[in-house]
Amino acid sequence: MKQVVVIGAGPAGASAAYFLSALGFEVLVVEKQQFPRNKTCGGGVTPKVLQELHFSLETVIEKTIKQTILTNNNNLPITITREHPMVYMVERAKFDQFLLDKAVETGAKLKYGKVIKIVSVNDGYEVQLADGTVIAADYIIGADGAQGVSYKHVNYRNNRELAVTVEAEIPNYHDLSSILVDYGIHLLE
Ligand SMILES: Cc1cc2nc3c(=O)[nH]c(=O)nc-3n(C[C@H](O)[C@H](O)[C@H](O)COP(=O)(O)OP(=O)(O)OC[C@H]3O[C@@H](n4cnc5c(N)ncnc54)[C@H](O)[C@@H]3O)c2cc1C
C-alpha cells in the first residue's frame, strides 16, 4: 500500500485526500491549525467546482449569486446579471471542515502538526514535524499554500519579488443577492 502524505487540509489538500482515499490509497493529511479554522477568502465557489465533486455542497452553501457588480476603485459600476447561478457563497471555516470531513469519512487519516522539513530519501520522502515526529511517505502532496514548506522543498522559483498585502473582512453594503468585485489599487497613506 502506497502512503500519500498530504500537507495542508485546505480545499486543495482535503479534496486530494478525498479522491485518493476513494481510489484506495493510504492517505495521511497533516494540518498545522486546529479545524474548523478561518481563511481570508471571498468564499465564492464556481458552478464548475460543483461538477467536479462527487457529493453535494448544499449544506454549506449560504447564498446563490446571479449578479456581479464590477467596479474600478469603487467607480464605474458594471452590473452583470445571469439567469443561472454565477457563484455559490460559502463560509470558509464551514466549507473547509466539510471537505475535510468528507476525506476522513472516505478513509483518510488526519494528524495535527506543523511540517517543518521534507527530506528526499531513496524510496520516497521523510516528512518532519515540529514535535519531532518523522513520517515516511511514498508520495507527498504539497497543499500548504504559496509560502509553504512544500514550495521551499521544490524551490520552484527562488527569484520572486515580495509584496505586502493587507487582508480584512468588510461588509457588503450592496444588495446581498449580488457580489461586488472592485479592481483597484488602494494605496495606504
Ligand atoms: C482576499 C481573498 C479572497 C479570495 N476569494 C476567493 C473566492 O471568492 N473564491 C475562490 O475560489 N478563491 C478565493 N481566494 C483564493 C482561495 O482562498 C485560495 O485559492 C484557497 O484557499 C487555496 O486553497 P489551498 O487548499 O491551496 O490552501 P489554503 O486554503 O491556504 O490551505 C492551506 C492549509 O495548509 C496548512 N499549512 C500551511 N503550512 C503548513 C505546514 N507547514 N504544516 C501543516 N499544515 C500547513 C494551513 O494551515 C492551511 O490550513 C481568495 C483569496 C484571498 C486572499
Image (cartoon, rainbow, N blue to C red):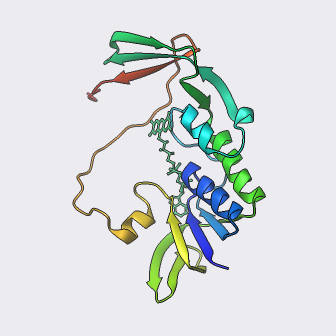
Residue located at (37% from left, 22% from top)? 182
**Closest to the observer, 95 or 122:** 122
161 sits left or right of 71 in the view:
left
Residue located at (46% from left, 33% from top)? 168
**Relative height, residue 140 to residue 178 (above, below):** below
Q: Position of residue 149 (x, y in %)?
A: 44, 66
Looking at the figure, which quarter contains the C terminus? top left
Q: Quadrant of residue 49?
A: top right
Looking at the figure, which quarter contains the N terminus? bottom right
Q: Is residue 129 visible?
A: no
Residue located at (44% from left, 60% from top)? 148
**Relative height, residue 183 to residue 27 (above, below):** above
**Closest to the observer, 130 or 151:** 151
55 sits left or right of 31 in the view:
right
Q: Is residue 16 visible?
A: yes
Residue located at (50% from left, 58% from top)? 144
Q: Residue furthest right?
A: 105
Q: Quadrant of residue 32?
A: bottom right
Q: Quadrant of residue 187?
A: top left
Count of marks overlaid on the render: 0
106 sits left or right of 85 in the view:
right
Q: Position of residue 16 (x, y in %)?
A: 59, 58
**Relative height, residue 38 to residue 128 (above, below):** above
Q: Position of residue 26 (x, y in %)?
A: 68, 72
Q: Position of residue 119 (x, y in %)?
A: 45, 81
